[in-house]
């Protein structure tokens, strides 16, 4: 299927190859962490592939492509959906299933995927919008709710042999100052919004890995059009 947030496997592979041709070097979240800690260098023109929610088709379709192209990706999962897939037995339909905890271990152990946190149960529109604050909620109340949700998914992942995440993708892109504080208190090093644009990561500055912008891949665009869009934004960013 195709749609605004649905991409065919062939288009994903075309994207990767097209960006390589434009000089982009694909990196992993770990590469970014080490660079921001001042522990390694990175190519000047980098790209990171991210998948949100934790759909089973990330394993079925995307992993073989990542392996073939030799690139890594971040898969940020919604815990309650992974739990449902794990206990329901309805886990391997590429049209709607989510990854089980065992599937996540397969992705991690491949060496081509890092697992990120996309909340356990806060990927909702109501009563709060993602990790947004509810009207009248105190700072301490908010931090308690958000922190407990992070801890729940982190604990379940670790119980299933998956490394504690240090990357977080904000549901619907909604973020705030307190959320950043909670993430940093728990050792998170990267966070991702849904704002589009180029990021400038500073060597030795871990704060430059927070609130990272991304390009939301519209499945209705051709690969050539998408790659040209990213290349154009990169060139504009370098002129500032």
Image: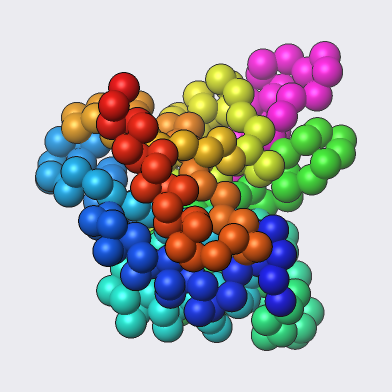
Tell me, yes or no, whether the highlighted magenta stretch contains residue 223.
no
Residue drawn at the location 46% of the way across and 63% of the way down: 224
Tell me, yes or no, whether the highlighted magenta stretch contains residue 149.
yes
Q: Percent position (x, y) of residue 84? A: 75, 70
Q: Percent position (x, y) of residue 32? A: 28, 45
Q: Percent position (x, y) of residue 237? A: 35, 31
Quadrant of the snapshot with the N terminus = bottom right
Q: Quadrant of residue 125?
A: top right
Residue drawn at the location 24% of the way across and 47% of the way down: 45
Relative to 55, is 11 on the left or the right? left
- Magenta region, main secondary structure: helix
Residue drawn at the location 76% of the way across and 83% of the way down: 90
Residue drawn at the location 34% of the way across and 79% of the way down: 67
Q: Nearer the viewer, residue 145 or 67?
A: 67
Q: Percent position (x, y) of residue 44? A: 19, 43
Display coloring: rainbow
Considering every residue shown, the one lying at the far right of the view is: 127
Relative to 189, is 145 on the left or the right? right
In the displayed structure, 38 sits above or below 231; it is above
The magenta-colored residue range is 131-150
In the displayed structure, 138 sits above or below 79; it is above
In the displayed structure, 60 sits above or below 12; it is below
Q: Quadrant of residue 112?
A: bottom left
Relative to 98, is 163 on the left or the right? left
Q: Nearer the viewer, residue 231 or 121?
A: 231
Q: How many marks?
A: 0
Quadrant of the snapshot with the C terminus = top left
């Amino acid at each position: 299927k195709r749609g605004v947030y649905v991409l065919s496997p062939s288009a994903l592979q075309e994207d990767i190859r097209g960006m390589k041709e434009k000089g982009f070097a694909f990196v992993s979240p770990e590469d970014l962490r080490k660079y921001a800690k001042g522990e390694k260098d990175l190519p000047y023109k980098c790209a990171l592939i991210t998948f949100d929610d934790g759909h089973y088709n990330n394993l079925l379709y995307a992993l073989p492509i990542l392996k073939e192209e030799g690139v890594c990706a971040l898969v940020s999962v919604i815990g309650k959906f992974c739990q449902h897939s794990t206990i329901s037995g309805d886990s391997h339909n590429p049209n709607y299933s989510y990854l089980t905890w065992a599937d996540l271990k397969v992705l991690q152990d491949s060496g081509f995927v890092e697992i990120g946190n996309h909340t356990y149960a806060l990927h909702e529109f109501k009563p709060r919008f993602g990790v947004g604050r509810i009207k009248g909620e105190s700072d301490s109340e908010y931090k308690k709710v958000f922190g407990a949700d992070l801890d729940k998914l982190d604990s379940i992942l670790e119980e299933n042999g998956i490394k504690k995440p240090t990357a977080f993708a904000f549901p619907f892109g909604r973020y705030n100052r307190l959320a950043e504080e909670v993430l940093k208190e728990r050792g998170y090093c990267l966070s991702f919004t849904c704002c589009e644009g180029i990021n400038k990561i500073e060597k030795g500055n871990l704060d430059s890995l927070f609130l990272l912008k991304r390009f939301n891949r519209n499945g209705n665009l051709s690969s050539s059009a998408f790659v040209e869009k990213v290349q154009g934004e990169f060139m504009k960013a370098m002129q500032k």
